[in-house]
Image (cartoon, rainbow, N blue to C red):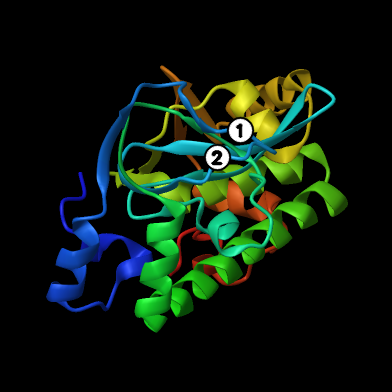
Amino acid sequence: MITNLSDITIFSGLPKDSLSHIESLLKERQFKKNHVLMFENDLSQEVYLIRSGKLKVYRISEDREIILKVATPGEILGESEALSNHNYRLSTVEALENVSAWQIEKQDFLRIVEQYPSVLKNAYTILIERIRILNRLIRYLSFYDVRTRTANLITDLYYNFGKQEDSIFKIDLKINQSFLANMIGVTRESISKTLSDFQDEEILDIRNKYFYILNKSKLESICKNTEEIPELRIWDNQ
């Protein structure tokens, strides 16, 4: 649980007195798992600062969902629309688990941006990082087969949510097949077959929706050196 506003990326570097002023503008919110904070194309204007819990950011087209990212504590959501001339939400945001957040109104956020130029600079940095992540997603969708996409995604998930337990690498995020399929734009049947192959090849084990990488080097070999620098797999690099 994030308790200090300085741990929210967009406000990093601000002095304590400035943070105290911003804190007075915040409203604490609690959201249950599966609650939708934002709907794509909606006109809501709130900005959210994530304190605990994970959320999925996605878009829907013709009843198909494509997950753009998983938001984690320390991130801000809704600031892009607040800074834009268009108020329509760019995507849908849904809680993957119980979420605690601070909420700030658009006009208050814009006044903060005007008063503290470093906040706007941080917002630009966050935007560039999101573009980088989306560029990688486009590359997965455009150039790789299902096996290579899946291997890359599992590797990405490890670099963002993984921890090593002896010689086994656990992804500390509950994942179902539909979630994976929606992250790389394939059918649930395709992802099911690929995961079954990885298990047969003793690359991966799945227990209670947690993924355990048994042979990390073999998994990374399937990625075909799509990312030579491991740090580029990290989604929250601000």
Residue visible at 56% across and 64% down in the picture? 83
Q: Which mark is residue 44?
A: 2
Q: Secondary structure at mark 2?
A: loop
Q: Position of residue 40 (x, y in %)?
A: 66, 37
Q: Percent position (x, y) of residue 182?
A: 69, 31
Mark toward the start of the polypeptide (1 vs 2): 1
- Relative side of 73 to 202, left or right: left
- Label 1 with label 2: CB-CB less than 8 Å: yes
Label 2: how many Cα within 10 Å (few below 14, some 14–19, many 20+): some
Which is more foreground, mark 1 or mark 2?
A: 2
- For the point 65% across and 54% down, the residue is 221
Asked whether, in this view, residue 14 is left or right of residue 156, the answer is left
Find residue 154 and report its image quarter: top right
Q: Amino acid at mark 2?
A: Ser
Specify whether 186 is left or right of 73.
right
**Residue 120 to residue 67: above or below:** below
Quarter holding the N terminus is top left
In front of the other: 180 or 80: 80
Question: Residue at the location (79% across, 21% down)?
Answer: 63
Mark 1 is on which residue type?
Phe
Position of 70 relative to 236 (above/below): above
Viewer-side residue, 41 vs 101: 41
Q: Which residue is mark 1?
A: 39
Q: Position of residue 52 (x, y in %)?
A: 28, 40
Q: Position of residue 162 (x, y in %)?
A: 39, 46
Q: Residue at point 50% right, 57% down?
A: 79
Most extreme residue toward the bottom is 117
